[in-house]
Each structure stands twice: as C-alpha cells, then as structure tokens.
Image: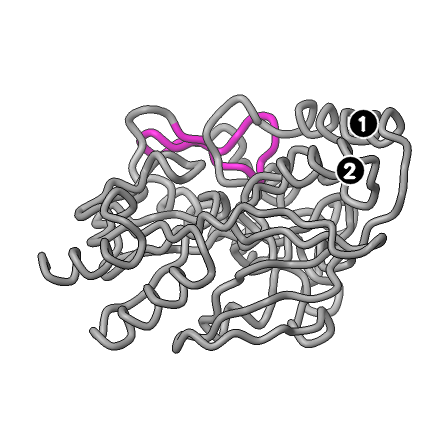
C-alpha cells in the first residue's frame, strides 16, 4: 500500500492523499467507514493521472462529491475514493458559465448572483456539488438541473476526456449516463442570462426559506431518500399525493427510528441521524419504510440514495 500511496502523492501532493481515511465527516448523513485511499486532485491533469494510475493498478475508483445523496457503508470503501477539488468558475460567453465538478451548487448560485447572472437562483439551498448534481440530475420544485445544462466535460475510466452535449448525457429523473459509464465529471456548462442582483437574491432567499420550512435542514440527512412515484409505472391510491414522503407518512413511518436514524417528523422522505447513528441504522430504516409502503399501498418505492462501499 505504501508504494501506491507515494505514487498518488507524487501526482496530487502528499497532503492530498490519506490512507484509511474516515469518510463520515465528508457526507451529509455523517456516518460511514473509511476509504482505503482518499485522493483529492485539484486539476484536470491530476485527476486524469489518478484515474489512470488506479486503472493500471487494478484499484477500484469511487467518486465522492459533496457527500449528499450517498450512504457510505460502516465497513468503508475499498480502493481509492477520489474527491475532485475542481473549483474554478469561468464566464465563457455572455450566456454561458462553466463550473468545475467540485464547485458547490450553493457556491455557484452565489457566484452568479454576485455577477448579476440569472438562471440558477432558485437552486439556492441545494446540497452537493456540480459533479454530484450531474450524476443524479438534481431536481427541485418539479424541475431538473439538466434543464440549465448545455454541455459536460466527462472523463472515462481510462482518463480520456469528452465534451458531451446535454442531449448526450441521458438525463432523466434522478438519472444520467454517468450512472452506467463510470465517467467522472470534470466541469459542466450552464445557460445563464443577465439579471438584477437584488431580484435574483430575492428568489434565492425565497427558495432557501421554503426549504427551511419544509425540510429538516437543521439535522444531518442526505436529502430525499426515495424517488417520487412515476405516473407511468406506479398506481397511487386515490386521495394520496404522488409523493414518496406522503406515502411513507400515510404508512405510519414518520418519526419511526432504528438506532440513531429516524424518519423526519418534518418531511417523511428524509431520514435524519444523530451522533450515535450508523450506516446500518439508516439502511435498515430505508428498508422498513419501503416495505411498509409496499404492504400498505402496493407501491414499490425506488431509492434516490446511492449505497457506497462494502455492504
């Protein structure tokens, strides 16, 4: 392990390589075990070199962004966890802005508003990074973030880069091609428009206030646990909203607990954790909620949460 550790260090700097690195603090759930290696490249070239070295060494690569929408196993993650620190934002054209995979969505919103550029202000309060948002096609208020994307630079498992138009990313509800290709996001470009800073800021504040009213933002969670039912695949009983949270609530799971994990009393599609929680607690509660909804309503809930590591 030492030689490979040294090789990663030569590529990104030894201060950006950790062995047996705890991951819990890097996730919004605040649970999970360590990575064999944690590597944090700060440039496209370093990211490419790390990906290629891992491939040559036969070491699996797991990409971690802002740590939302993921549940890291208590046993941790084998191989190398790559946490891209690609944080550059560039105004590439009057109506285009390019943001690195490691830029937080909130940071991007603030950057745009500060330059009187509109388009993403309603996404204020969205957890995670640009890379993670591309992977899962983040959604809010009935809209997908892909609606604002023009193109994405992706890196193959072999380190080759390709610019893909948004239409080539297979974006769908909670989905993108990244989930099947193992490509890594380098940057994404967004369509923007000139705006008035005060007006854009007002929209952002209203969006954040709505989230605070309806979501347990004061507690550790990973965002929505389940996808909402799909009209073409699911049959929700009359009188119940087409909402995973409503189904979990009506099934009697709101407030239920397993160990240090609980279904939020503010929003039943959120699981929150306390200091004693484990990833196993969270996963067991997810299973219980899905089984209760299936028994009660015949609806098979699909998870938004991605299970990462050795389960």
Camera-side residue of 74 and 290:
74
N-terminal label among 2 and 1: 2
Seen at 23% across and 69% down, the residue is: 59
Q: Residue 310's spot in the image, x, y percent?
A: 25, 58
SS label for mark 2: helix
Is 260 covered by the magenta stretch? Answer: yes
Is 265 covered by the magenta stretch? Answer: yes
Seen at 76% across and 31% down, the residue is: 114
Residue 300 visible in rendering: no
Tell me if 68 is positioned left or right of 188 in this view: left
Which numbered marker is on residue 201?
Answer: 1
Which numbered marker is on residue 121?
Answer: 2
Circle 2/circle 1 CB separation < 8 Å: yes
Q: Quadrant of residue 162?
A: bottom right
What is the magenta range? 257-273
Which numbered marker is on residue 79?
Answer: none
Q: How far apart in space, not on screen, are marks 2 and 1 (Cα)? A: 7 Å
Tell me if 242 is positioned left or right of 304 in this view: right
SS label for mark 1: helix
**Relative vertical location of residue 204 with respect to residue 128 in this rendering, above or below:** above
Q: Residue 93's spot in the image, x, y percent?
A: 80, 56
Q: Residue 29's spot in the image, x, y percent?
A: 41, 36
């Amino acid at each position: 392990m030492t030689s490979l550790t040294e090789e990663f260090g030569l590529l990104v700097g030894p201060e950006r390589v950790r062995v047996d690195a705890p991951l819990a603090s890097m996730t919004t759930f605040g649970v999970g075990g360590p990575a064999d290696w944690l590597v944090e490249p700060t440039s496209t070239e370093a990211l490419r070199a790390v990906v290629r070295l891992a491939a040559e060494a036969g070491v699996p690569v797991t990409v971690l962004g802002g740590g939302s929408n993921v549940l890291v196993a208590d046993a941790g993650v084998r191989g190398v966890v790559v946490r891209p620190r690609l944080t550059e934002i560039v105004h590439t054209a009057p109506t285009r802005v390019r943001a690195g995979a490691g830029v937080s969505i909130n940071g991007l919103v603030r950057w745009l508003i500060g330059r009187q550029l509109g388009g993403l202000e309603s996404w204020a309060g969205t957890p995670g990074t640009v890379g993670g948002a591309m992977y899962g096609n983040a959604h809010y208020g009935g809209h997908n973030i892909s609606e604002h994307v023009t193109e994405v630079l992706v890196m193959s498992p072999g380190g080759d880069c390709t610019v893909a138009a948004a239409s080539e990313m297979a974006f769908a509800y909670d989905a993108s091609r990244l989930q099947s290709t193992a490509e890594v996001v380098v940057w994404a470009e967004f369509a923007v428009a000139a705006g008035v800073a005060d007006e854009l800021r007002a929209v952002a504040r209203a969006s954040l206030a709505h989230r605070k009213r309806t979501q347990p933002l004061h507690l550790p969670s990973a965002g929505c646990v389940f996808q909402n039912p799909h009209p073409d695949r699911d049959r929700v009983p009359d009188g119940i909203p087409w909402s995973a949270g409503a189904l979990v609530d009506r099934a009697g799971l709101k407030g239920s607990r397993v160990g240090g994990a609980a279904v939020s009393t503010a929003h039943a599609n959120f699981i929150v954790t306390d200091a004693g929680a484990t990833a196993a607690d969270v996963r067991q509660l997810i299973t219980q909620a899905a089984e209760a909804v299936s028994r009660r309503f015949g609806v098979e809930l699909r998870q938004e949460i991605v299970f990462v590591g050795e389960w």
